[in-house]
Amino acid sequence: MVDDDDSTRGHLSVLLSGLGYGVAVSPSGDEAISRLASGHLPAAVMLDLVMPGMGGLDVLDHIKSTYPQIPVVILSSLGQIKTVVDAMNRGASDYLVKPVQEAELTIALESALEKQRLRDEVRVLRRRLDQYDPAEFLSSSPRMLKLKEIARQVADTDAPVLVLGETGVGKELLVRYIHEQSPRHDKPFIKVNCAALPHDLLESELFGYERGAFSGAVRDKPGKFELAHKGSILLDEIAEMSPHVQAKLLHVLQDGEYSRLGARHSSRVDSRVFASTNIPLERAVAEGKFRQDLYFRVNVIRMEVPPLRERPEDIPLLANAFLRRYLERYSSPAREIPPELAEAFRRHTWPGNVRELDNAVRRFAILPDVNLALDELSKMRPEVREAPSAEDLSLKTIASQAAERAEQEVVRRALAETRWNRREAARRLRISYKALLNKIKKWQLEAEAPTLASPPDTAPAKGTRGAE
């Protein structure tokens, strides 16, 4: 309850306590916001509109932008009707005219809490429907089934989980599965792609900022950790974090506290942390690119998702599951994957893993032409291999290495032909720009140095080894 009037606070505290509520009071808007920022989030807020210092409407705006799940009931005087209407338009749940009676207080609070409960249920159901994937953990691979069992065992804990694996293998699906099996399943699941944001923006994205913290910060903004309070947060591509942000993340993992940019105080947060990467973190630690103490913090539970080429028995299961999903979405006339396409799927090496298979099936559902699908598949991968037998592990290793060398050569050629215009090269290779950047980083590709045949404006300077 936020009200500067002592008698109102005393009267309503008695009424609320009699109704079975625990009551926290703040005599000013500034104190109320500080209390919220410290992590003490109530089921509802009762808010006076006219107060010295920070006014009720400003407090309401802050709550609705930062903690939208908290219903706010307005306390008003008879002369504030226009202001009350404004407050309702800004998101207030209800209003009570002073002096407040017990019956109307009961009705207002129960109604506000019930409406919020229904909103939460709808939000959770929509999120689950949006994220539902019929191919989730559809597997006959012993390694994947073992991962599923481990996921069930760790779901009830709050231990950080590090998920490793190539791009497209399904690291996020595994993390979401753990979250959905956990006691936090009805709380937020927040994903942050650490590679998609510049380092100077990633900090504000994770921890938020206060109004005036920098030029353009015209209002408070909650960070992803704040939005994931009581829920889970996935730090995808965690190896891309700058050392400065790594240090702040370590503080969150150690003490459960963080600070918004420009804040004068720290806030507590209760979020389960998941991290994923396609880069060996041990190597990043050895090269000084990733903090060793942070590595130990995120590497409590370690799970590695195998690439699709190492679990070929999953290819037909996943392909049919994807097809069932897209048949209805695109009103496709296709009813099954033809035998010749299924065989091509079996022989393909799937450098893009499950994500590439998903896209291949989607293309076929939209354009159910077998020859076109086979042609597209061959363009995505110039060389194919026979699926290895379980008894011939050396052949499997050799084929995998040969396939990767062939892929490197195709990428090098595309980059050379486009003069290292990476977006154009990605378009020609029919892969995403991010996927191309990951391959360049993985293989440490660099533009070749200019030679004697180079145009005059790019030729080596006289006296260099190239000029000699």
Image: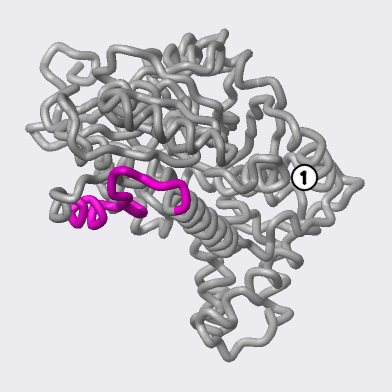
Task: Tell me, yes or no, whether the highlighted magenta stretch contains residue 276.
Answer: no
Query: x%, y% of residue 336?
Result: 69, 83
Residue name at image x 14 percent, y 28 percent: 459
**From where the camera sits, is residue 435 visible?**
no
Task: Categorize mark 1 by other alpha carbons within 10 Å: few (<14), some (14-19), many (20+).
Answer: some
Q: Is residue 387 above or below residue 270?
A: below
Q: Is mark 1 on a helix, strand or loop?
A: helix
Q: Quadrant of residue 246?
A: top left
Query: x%, y% of residue 367?
Result: 50, 82
285 sits to left or right of 94: right
**From where the camera sits, is residue 44 visible?**
yes
* Nearer-the-camera pick, 445 or 152: 152
Query: x%, y% of residue 83?
Result: 15, 50
Q: Is residue 57 above or below residue 33?
A: below
* Nearer-the-camera pick, 443 or 193: 193
36 sits to left or right of 179: left
* Nearer-the-camera pick, 255 or 346: 255
Residue name at image x 63 percent, y 69 percent: 322
Q: Quadrant of residue 192?
A: top left
Figure disc tally: 1
* Nearer-the-camera pick, 108 or 97: 97
Task: Tell me, yes or no, whether the highlighted magenta stretch contains residue 96.
Answer: yes
Which quadrant, please, contains the C terminus? top left
Which quadrant, please, contains the N terminus? top left
Query: x%, y% of residue 427?
Result: 34, 57
From the image, tell me which residue sits under label 1: 396
Q: In which quarter of the image is residue 215?
A: top left
Amino acid bearing label 1:
Lys
Start-end of magenta stretch: 84-103
